[in-house]
Image (cartoon, rainbow, N blue to C red):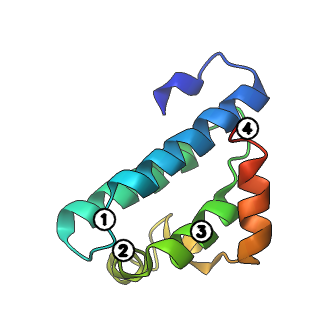
Amino acid sequence: MNRTTAVEPQETKRIIVRDFFALIETVPNKDDQASIQTFLRYLQSLLRIKQVVPPVVEIMTVIKQNKPLLYHAARRVTLPSSNLHMLFQLEMDIMLAHERLRQYDK
C-alpha cells in the first residue's frame, strides 16, 4: 500500500481496491493468529492513507460477508480503545458495497 504516495486520487483508490481483492484471495477465512494479524495490518494501512478517503465502509462490509470467521475473530481481539475498533462498527448494504468497489476495480 506504500505505492499511493504520488499517484492521482482515482488511481490511488484503484490500488486500494486491487490490494483489498488480493487480500481477500490470499487470507483464509480462519480465526488463526496469522490471518488476524494480516487483516489488522491491512486495516491499519488503510487508516494511514491521507491522499484519499479509502472505501473503508465497503471493505468492512465485504470482509464481514465473505470472511465471517476472520472478521469476528479480528473484532474480538480489537480493543475498544484501538483506532481499529470504529471500523468494526461500519456496515452497509452488501450489494451497494460490491457495486462501489467494482467501479474502481477496472
10 Å crowding of disc 4: few (<14), some (14-19), many (20+): few
Q: Earlier in the sequence, mark 4 or mark 3?
A: 4
The residue to which callout 1 is attached is 28
Total numbered labels placed on residues in the image? 4
Give the amino acid type for the residue marked by disc 2 in the picture.
Answer: Leu
Residue 51 location in percent, x, y? 70, 32
Give the amino acid type for the residue marked by disc 3 in the picture.
Answer: Val
Q: Earlier in the sequence, mark 2 or mark 1?
A: 1
The residue to which callout 3 is attached is 62
Q: Are marks 2 and 4 in contact (CB under 8 Å)?
A: no
Nearer the camera: disc 2 or disc 1: 1
Residue drawn at the location 33% of the way across and 58% of the way down: 27
Q: Is residue 35 above or below residue 12?
A: below
Residue 12 location in percent, x, y? 67, 30
Q: CA distance from mark 2 to mark 1?
A: 8 Å
Q: Earlier in the sequence, mark 1 or mark 3?
A: 1
